[in-house]
Image: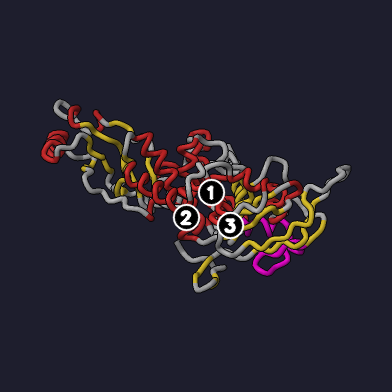
Amino acid sequence: MATSATAVENGGEEVSGVEIQLEQVSKRYPGQQHPAVENFSMVVPAGKIVIFVGPSGCGKTTTMRMINRLIEPTSGKITIGGKDALSLNPDQLRRTIGYAIQQAGLFPHFTVGQNIAVVPGLLGWTKQKISSRVDEMMDLVGLDPAQFRDRYPRQLSGGQQQRVGVARALAADPPVLLMDEPFGAVDPITRGNLQDELLRLQTDLKKTIVFVTHDFSEAVKLGDKIAVLGDRSTILQYDTPDAILANPANDTVAGFVGAGASLKQLTLLRVRDIDYSDEGLITVTKGDSPADVRKRLTDARKTYGLVLDNRRRPLSWVHVRDLAAAGSLEAVARPIGDSVSTQSTLQDALEAILTEGGRAVVTGPRGEYVGGVDIETVMDTVRQLRAEHGDDA
C-alpha cells in the first residue's frame, strides 16, 4: 500500500497516524445536573492503538465522538496533528478521520464498492483513482473485489460487513481512525478474526486509532495503551496492557482485570512469539486427486490432510478413510472450525485448539497457511507464566 502523505517519523519509525491531544475537554447537556464528560485530558500517541474501556454510560463513546465533532465539546481544546480541530469545518474534519461503528453502518442501497468509495468521492477523487482504491482496500481486508464489489450489504455475513466498514473508514487514507465497538455484534470466532485483521492492518498502516469497547480482554489484545474510564470519563488508569494487568491502580480497575490475571498474560503474547512450525501436517491443494492424497497420508501415517487453495489459504480438512471412493477432495471436505493468524493471541490459539481437537491452523498476513500450533506448546507457555507470576487463577 502506498505511504500516506501524512506519514511522519516517530521514534525512528515511519507512521501515517498523527498525535491527538485532548485538554480539559467537557460535554454538558442542557437540563443535566452533571456533565457527561468532565475535564478530560489525554495524549494519544501517533501511530498507536488507544483503547477506551469502561462501563456503559461512563462517557467513553461521547469522548471519542468529540474528536471528530459528531458531538460538539462544551469546553476544552482538541488538536489533531497539531491543528485545532474545533476551528475546522466539521465536515472537512470528518473526511480526514476514519470512523467505524458496530454493525458496520453501511448504506444498504449502495454496493460494497460504492460504500467504500463514499469519502474519496466527496473529496473529488477521479473515477479511475477511486476504482483502484476500492479494489486495493477490498484486497487489504481480505475480500475479493471480483466476488464482492457489486454485492449489497444484505448479501454479506456480519463479519464481511464489518470488513467493508473498516475498508470504507480507511479508503481516503486518514491519519486517524475512530472505532466504536466495531466488532461487538458478531459471533466470538468472527470477532477474534476481525481483531486479528485489525492488528495485521495496523502493522502495515500505523494509523492513530481510538477504539471504544466494554470488553477488557479485547482492550488487552488490541491496545498499545488502555484508558480505563469511570463516571464522566474520569481516567482511572492510562497505561500499557501489561502494566495494568500487573498493577491495577485501584479496586475499580482491578474489577475490570478480574481473576486470573496471570492467564490474561496469554492475551499479551502472540502466536508469532511461539513455535508454529508445520512439522507433521500434510498439506494438499484442492486440485489434487483423492488417490494421490490418500497415498501421501497413508505413507506418512497421518489421518488428516489440510486442503489449500491456489493462494495457499486453508480451505478444509480431508480424512484418509473418506478418500478411497471419493471423486474429488471437495466431495469429502470437512470444514475448518476455527483457525488463528500469527497476530492472534495465545488465548485465541487455546480456544481454537480446543475447538479443533488439539491443533489449530495458523495463517499469515494474507491468510496463507504458515503452520500449526498444538495444545502442548500453549500449555508450556501457561506453565511458564504461572511459574513467573504465581497462580492467581
- Residue 71 picture location, percent across and down: 75, 50
Per the image, the residue denoted by label 3 is 225
- The percent coordinates of residue 80 (x first, y second) are 67, 64
**Label 2, label 1: how far apart the Cα atoms are:** 10 Å
> What kind of colouring is applied to the model shown?
secondary structure
Mark 3 and mark 1 lie on one chain; the one further toward the N terminus is: 1
- Look at the image and give the residue range highlighted in magenta: 77-97
Q: Which residue does the numbered mark 2 point to in the structure image? A: 201
Q: Which residue is mark 1?
A: 166
Q: Is residue 12 above or below residue 349?
A: below
Residue 385 visible in image: yes
Q: Confirm whether residue 170 shows in the render.
A: no
Tell me the quadrant of the picture where the N terminus can be found: bottom left
Q: Position of residue 109 (x, y in %)?
A: 58, 37
Left or right, 112 with respect to 276, comes to: right
Judge the density around disc 3: few (<14), some (14-19), many (≥20) Cα neighbours within 10 Å.
Answer: many
Q: Amino acid at mark 1?
A: Val
Where disc 1 sits, the SS reads: helix
**Which of disc 1 and disc 2 is earlier in sequence?**
1
Magenta region includes residue 94: yes
Determine whether label 2 and label 1 are within 8 Å by CB: yes
Q: Position of residue 307 (x, y in %)?
A: 26, 40
